[in-house]
Image: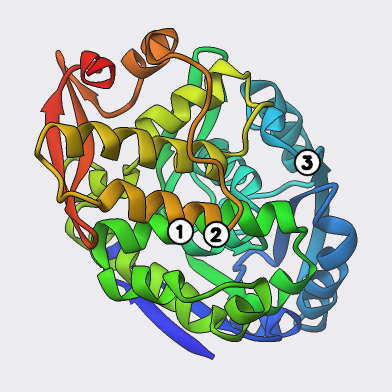
Amino acid sequence: MKTLRVDLGINSYDIIIGKNILSNIGNHIKSEGGKVFIISDTNVAPIFANTIIDSLLEKGLDCKLEVLEAGEETKNIKSIAPLYSSMLSYNLTRKDLIITLGGGVIGDLGGFVASTYLRGVPFVQVPTSLLAQVDSSVGGKVAVDLPEGKNLVGSFYQPKLVYIDTDVLHDLPDAFYVDGMAEIIKYGCIKDKALFELLENIHSRDEFMQKVEDIVYTCCDIKRKVVEIDEKDTGERMLLNFGHTYGHAIEKYYNFKGYTHGQAVAIGMVFITSISERLGLTQKGTTERIANILKNFGLPISDKVRPEQLMSAMLNDKKNMGKKLHVVLLKEIGESFTYPTTAEFFLK
């Protein structure tokens, strides 16, 4: 078991990473009020919820489980009110605790609920998807989607703990494994050339799982460092959005049903790097390397949708600041920078 400390002053917390540790979560959970409200989904709860509940009950904690329909469509305003009502009927107070057990959708939605219910209840992230373990569970960005776009209503609200059991990934369907690989590849692109080169030499899921604990640790450590520098996403943290402006627009274009988040980001990384390489902002051959590694892990690298069809979604992007859109580009693999421009950049 490995531990990373995210140093954010009074909002500091640990990320615990290990194998076969889910059944021990009760040893790391504190609830002053004695109650734990668990938010999960229809895919994850049947597999892992009882393990967590049993561990918490052993420590004398009272638990309530709320299970939402799995899928991005759940991450919206309509899902929130029933959760608030359930918490109130359970008499959940600010001395109690919320656990988000699931992938990015549950982590984002549940974290947003935790940040707003009674003006803030402590919560713990227990990510069960690869994407959530390496990315969305860390850093305190919690949100829901609007019809106009992804993650447009949210807050910065740090968890009290992120508890990552990499063994749960053995039960992960291939589609979710592939989805998470896009974010891992992103980390290699923006910050860690050695990680990128390691991934270039992995050719099967079995090979990946042999190294999974170290890879998850590396990604969490990269994000930890970035978040400590820029918690509120106004500078350095924007680098984590490489491929996301275009990717989020693609997700919105297909009403969150055409591509998974990772697939859309994969397309976005290739598309924006092809432009920056053409403009001489990125080292020659970078686009090809990214495309090759994405294809190796079964991710798409292009889509038939035209960039001009995505303009409205990109103009709603959270990285818009005034009249400028700050896109993330690569100088080369492992070195990234933000580039102030406009949405028309994607038409070049």
Judge whether 2 appears above or below 299 on screen.
below
Which residue is label 2 attached to?
296
The reply, left or right, for residue 276 in relation to residue 121 is left
Residue 175: x percent and y percent?
71, 51
- Viewport quadrant of the C terminus: top left
- Report the Cα–Cα distance between label 1 and label 2: 5 Å
**In the rendered structure, which amino acid carries the disc numbered 2?**
Asn
- For the residues labelled 1 and 3, say whether their Cβ atoms are less than 8 Å apart: no
Which residue is label 3 attached to?
70
- Viewport quadrant of the N terminus: bottom right
Could you say whether the residue bearing mark 2 is in a helix, strand or loop?
helix
Judge whether 11 appears above or below 60 on screen.
above
Which is more toward the observer, 148 or 185? 185
- Report the Cα–Cα distance between label 2 and label 3: 27 Å
The reply, left or right, for residue 242 in relation to residue 81 is left
Closer to the eye: label 2 or 3: 2
Point 23% across, 40% down: residue: 328
Mark 3, residues whose alpha carbon is within 10 Å: few (<14), some, or many (≥20)?
some
**In the rendered structure, which amino acid carries the disc numbered 3?**
Ala
Which is more toward the observer, 118 or 212? 212
Point 29% across, 64% down: residue: 10
**In the rendered structure, which amino acid carries the disc numbered 1?**
Ile
Which residue is label 1 attached to?
293
2 or 3: tag closer to the N-terminus: 3
Q: Quadrant of residue 147?
A: top right
Point 13% across, 34% down: residue: 339
Residue 100 in view in this figure: no
Residue 165: x percent and y percent?
64, 76
The reply, left or right, for residue 243 in relation to residue 213 is left
- Report the Cα–Cα distance between label 1 and label 3: 29 Å
- For the residues labelled 1 and 2, say whether their Cβ atoms are less than 8 Å apart: yes
Could you say whether the residue bearing mark 1 is in a helix, strand or loop?
helix
